[in-house]
Image (cartoon, grey):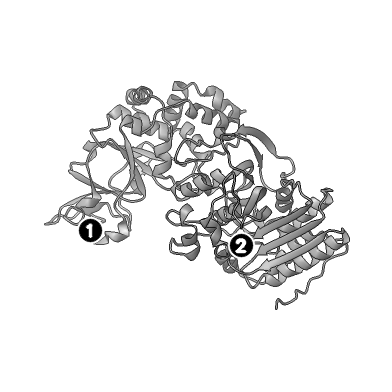
Amino acid sequence: MIQAVNLQPLDNELPSHFADRLGVLYAKTVTTQHKKDNGQFFTPTEIAHFMARLVRPTKGKLKILDPGCGTAILSSSLIETIILRGDAIKEIELVVYETDIDILPYTQATLDYLEKWLQGKKVGFKATLDTNDFVLENKDCFEQTSTLFYEPKNAIYDIVISNPPYFKIGKDDKRAVVAKSIVWGQPNIYSIFLMTAAKLLKNGGELVFIIPRSFAAGNYFRAFREAFFSEVEIEQVHLFNSRTDTFNRDNVLQETLILKGKKQKLNGHLPNILLTHSNGVSDLDKPTEKEYQANELIDFNTKEKILHLPSNETEDKVIKLFKSWSGSLHKYDMQISTGPVVSFRATEYLYEQYENGTKVLVPLYQLINTGKMTFEYPVFKKGKPQYIQFCEETKPLLLPNKNYIFLRRFSAKDDKSRLVAAPYFVDISQAEFIGVENHLNYIYRPKGHLARNEILGLAALLNSKLFDTYFRTFNGNINVSATELREMPLPPLEDIKEIGNQIILTNNFSQSVVDELVNDYFDLEHIFAYEQN
């Protein structure tokens, strides 16, 4: 039996406003840690209404799903928007999922008031509050796949609307095991919610989610993107320029987006995607917008299926320039890998200072040794060993000392640049082997050596404003994965070498010179003029 909440609706109050007041009341009763443990970020009313307006049902009888519903503000906003808009709806069945027992009385209060409100509108209503785990309860949907001629028996919903929980789960978590077909590494629960919802939709059904943008790229979400884009046609994506405004009540710093899609197989047909932007919540009703063909934002021909999300005209032009290039690391006989030395697994072989003696020590290169177009070694800092012992146990972890480009795998959230590439030349160390720590990626030529002009040219490009702008169109987090860089289009190798030659001539590795050289070489004044204006 769910206890009653001591809060009553106001006269003629909208269900979504009542749900919002219930959310505020609930938030005062629990700790920040409780909300974090449950992945709870409560949707502001303005965002809930914006999401609701994206849905355009065509039937008079609807079955709606709201998984991870909280106080049911999203489903309330959706239903009241549909009814007040005058859509000819006669009957609504609503199923909401919520596992946090502390919030259930608040959820039930919203559902009770929603039923009463709909009675006044002469709309039939049935609500089910399911307290089971959403993914585990619907695990069967991962065993069936819809086709053009077959719809699984559990595809029963016309609309799914959700602000799912956001947190990582272990690969042995029951939910990750159920969704193993879309899981790689350590998954985030929100992507499993999104895929489950897609599978539960009828053909032609609509879904609207507010989620982090991390799914747009990266290895962890590759299987998810492959599956999701094959089942759902994306119709609209809304981006927020501010990371603080979306969930400001919960003090959350998160790059989020709103995704609107329709359950529909592409079958060779490429739909248009509407991309809209607002700075935050206050200007949500006045978004900028631009329409794209789906293949302008998603390259369906690659394994990665990266989703590009340009936020202005500059980024549009940069994406077009990159699409005109056909080069890649692979085509130029280059590879990118991740540093093999994981410090905490090799502590007994690591040294902060060089020691003369019977042990042979070789350099260990870390994040702190790298900067944009700069490499400094050694850098003595407590907890950042600069040497690794050369012995039988460490041999598999060491690399031959040759020419490389080192790239940081992580950037700070507010770094001006996501890409930090440091040129490294063999003559920096006399050692035959070197160690590269796991927080660095490295670019190399497996069969042979990278020439000096190749290293400087490619490092300059990676450090340039041009490449940083392109990278930000799909990467919404601080991770810089080898997979993303492996797929990144590159200009002709001769262009890379020529940029390297110019840097050798100027002998100036500063960021301003790098950007000037790259901008001049590709005649980018017209691209970055938009930003200056």
**Which residue is tagged 1?**
349
Residue 245 seen by the camera: no
CA–CA distance in space, label 2 to label 1: 43 Å
Mark 1, secondary structure of its residue: helix
Tell me residue 119's x, y (percent): 85, 62
The single residue placed furthest to the left in the displayed view is: 358
Q: Nearer the viewer, residue 51 or 245?
A: 51
Q: Nearer the viewer, residue 70 or 150?
A: 150
The residue shown at (60%, 65%) is 35
Count the marks: how many?
Answer: 2
* Vertical side of 22 occupied by 284: above or below: above
**Which residue is tagged 2?**
40
Q: Earlier in the sequence, mark 2 or mark 1?
A: 2
Badge 2: few (under 14), some or many (20 or more) residues near its Cα, within 10 Å?
many
* Vertical side of 128 occupied by 443: above or below: above
Tell me residue 89's x, y (percent): 81, 52
The residue shown at (53%, 58%) is 189
* Mark 2 vs 1: CB contact within 8 A: no
| Placement of the N terminus among the 4 image quadrants | bottom right
Three-letter code, disc 1: Tyr
* Vertical side of 261 occupied by 359: above or below: below
The residue shown at (71%, 53%) is 48
Badge 1: few (under 14), some or many (20 or more) residues near its Cα, within 10 Å?
some
Three-letter code, disc 2: Gln
Mark 2, secondary structure of its residue: loop
In the image, 313: left or right of 468? right
